Image (spheres, helix red, strand yellow):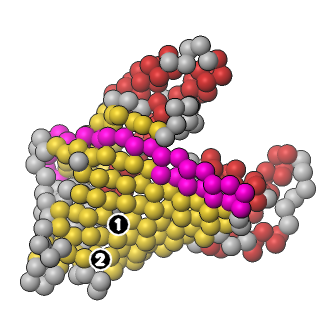
Amino acid sequence: MKHLFTLILFTFTFLVGFGQINEKDSLVNVKAFWNVDDTKKYRITTKEIRKTQESTAQEEISYRVNIKVENIFEDERTISWFYSDVNFNSDKFVNNPLFLVHNIPVKFVVDADGRFLRYEDLNATLQAFILSAEKIQNKYIDDEETFKRISDLAKRFANKENIMKIFEKDIRQFHLFFGTGEFIPKMNALEFNSYIDNLFTNAPTPAKTTIKLNEIAFTGTNYIMQSYQEADKEWLANSWYNYLKELAEKLGSEAPDESHLNDEIIYNVTTNSRIKDNGWISYSIETKKVNFQDTDYTLERRIELE
């Protein structure tokens, strides 16, 4: 079962208003003050580390994103992200949809507080993704196996149901704190029930989330917000057991022992973002950690203003 979990884990693979900082009473209202045609450039890097008793594996991906405020109408803001310059720490094919991304536009709408509302112009994103995938596939036209793997990967994401799954985690991290309210450093915190990605199925995992203001810079020009999400351990154990049970039925093998309901799975996500008083993020890091049996998994995503 340990090796099965390790295999599963290996493949497991929102802004307008003013970000007020009131120095007198050390209060921050997490919003953003952006204007039409404002543009910023970011470098995003994800590092994935998988450790077992037998081995350690690491994968790193970096890419650039140009962010632009396209339009402001009443209480809605249209934002565009443009993905380019994707690099992996390997020159071999990687079974990750970002491997097929080059010069891809993504457009979405947020409310006046910065909370995500909806994606827009999905057809433009889809067409750019298909063209990018074809160009990358052409590099492997003499490698039948890799050519087919790229084709399979492109087919999986070249539809309106899946295309935004490639980009949604970046966008979610960037806009995580906007619209969450007013905070005093290390005093008040926002606590609520939430969901995070599931380790075993497509159903989201119940979690407890705490959001707080860690610090206001002595200059009064930026502040640091933190979010901590912890998965429900009992729910995770049940999800793990049900997954094993379904897998056993498919394979026609022996059903798993109910003792797996006592298996402890530690799963948490911490996000820290330094936000300027105008709402632009200068640095953000999200760290996802999972510990189960002999497997330690860490996924780190950094967003840095260039």
Residues in magenta, as a range: 47-75
Asked whether 71 falls inside the magenta stretch, the response is: yes
Residue drawn at x 35%, y 34% as measured from the top left:
85
238 and 94: which is toward the camera: 94
Above or below for 135 versus 3: above
Q: Is residue 1 left or right of residue 280?
A: right
Residue drawn at x 45%, y 62% as measured from the top left:
287
Q: Quick check: marks 2 and 1 in contact, CB under 8 Å?
A: yes
Residue drawn at x 13%, y 84% as measured from the top left:
25
Query: In the rendering, which numbered label is found on residue 214?
Result: 2
Instruction: Give percent across and percent down for residue 99.
Output: 48, 33
* Neighbour tally class for label 2: few under 14, some 14-19, many 20 plus, Cα within 10 Å: many
Name the amino acid type tagged 2: Asn
Our reading of the magenta stretch's main secondary structure is strand
Cα separation between marks 2 and 1? 9 Å
Instruction: Give percent across and percent down for residue 236.
Output: 64, 67
Q: Is residue 28 left or right of residue 2?
A: left
For residue 294, what is the image quadrant?
bottom right
* Neighbour tally class for label 1: few under 14, some 14-19, many 20 plus, Cα within 10 Å: many
Query: In the rendering, which numbered label is found on residue 272?
Result: 1
